[in-house]
Amino acid sequence: MNLVLLEHSDFIDSDRVRLEGRRLTHILQVHRAVKGDTLRVGLVDGKTGKGIIEQIDSVALEMVVSLDSDPLASLPARLILALPRPKVLNRTVAAAASMGIREIDLINAWRVEKSYWESPRLSDGNLRLQSILGLEQGGDTLLPSIRLHRLFTPFVREQLPQQLKGHLALLASPGAHADPPRKVTEPVVLAIGPEGGFIDREVETFRDIGFTEVSLGPRILRVETAVAFLVGRLF
């Protein structure tokens, strides 16, 4: 936790917060903070600053906070991701949030197991928690917007084309030969498939609406690693 992320509900006064539960445990066990220590803090979807601990024990922490700095700049990237296995989903959402990705679309694909869509990890509460964990790691406050699309064709063929204007559209594909561009200056829409990649028909659909296939190299990468690899190459 490189940033203690605060909710509006944590405030007990205009400049004073009370924390319990997960964040308190982390501050006690990892930061080993004591009264008088200063922590880096931020308000969800708001500014960052510092908090000075005035009281702390095993039950609760109270600190006075000052929020006076803007959050980190967002990456000009939108991630379209074939829904991964539930355990992988948590890591991927957290990783994307930590890198500053502000838009994530989770989509269906032929190789996506139907059971994945029934996972409780797709709940609003869990997706928000994973986003918060990523923001705490990255030192950011701006929650990503996460959208679910259970049907491939209506989203990719009917909705997405209207949203690509002014964007560089890239499809990570195991069969591609072109390397991803470097140091791009325009907004990017990046699509990453399931394990084994999108099937040929799905790849053709992406091509038809203007996506360019790019390679991740000869190795097979985990989804969250693929996201980090491509973001690192692009920006």
Image: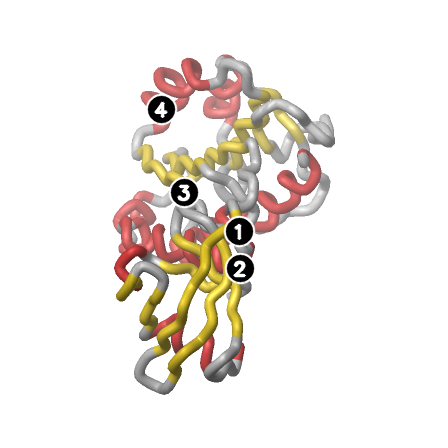
Q: Residues within 10 Å of mark 4 (few under 14, many from 20)?
A: some
Q: Earlier in the sequence, mark 4 or mark 1?
A: 1
Q: In the rendered structure, which amino acid carries the disc numbered 2?
A: Gln
Q: Is residue 91 above or below residue 19?
A: above
Q: Rounded to the nearest whole Å, what is the CA distance between mark 2 and mark 1?
A: 6 Å
Can I make out residue 30 in this image?
A: no
Which-is-in-front pick, marks 4 and 2? 2
Which residue lies at the image location 64% right of the left edge and 39% below the top edge?
230
Image disc number at residue 163: none
Mark 2, secondary structure of its residue: helix
Q: Quadrant of residue 210?
A: top right
Can I make out residue 130 in this image?
A: yes
Q: Earlier in the sequence, mark 1 or mark 3?
A: 3
Image disc number at residue 83: 3
Q: Which residue is mark 4?
A: 155
Quadrant for the C terminus in the image: top right
Q: Residues within 10 Å of mark 1 (few under 14, many from 20)?
A: many
Q: From the viewer's perspective, tell me whether residue 231 is left or right of residue 190.
A: right
Q: Earlier in the sequence, mark 4 or mark 2?
A: 2
Q: In the rendered structure, which amino acid carries the disc numbered 3?
A: Leu
Q: Position of residue 41 (x, y in %)?
A: 47, 61
Q: Which residue is mark 2?
A: 137
Q: Is residue 114 above or below residue 53?
A: above
Q: Are marks 4 and 3 in contact (CB under 8 Å)?
A: no
Q: In the rendered structure, which amino acid carries the disc numbered 4?
A: Phe
Q: Position of residue 130 (x, y in %)?
A: 41, 56
Q: Which residue is mark 1?
A: 98
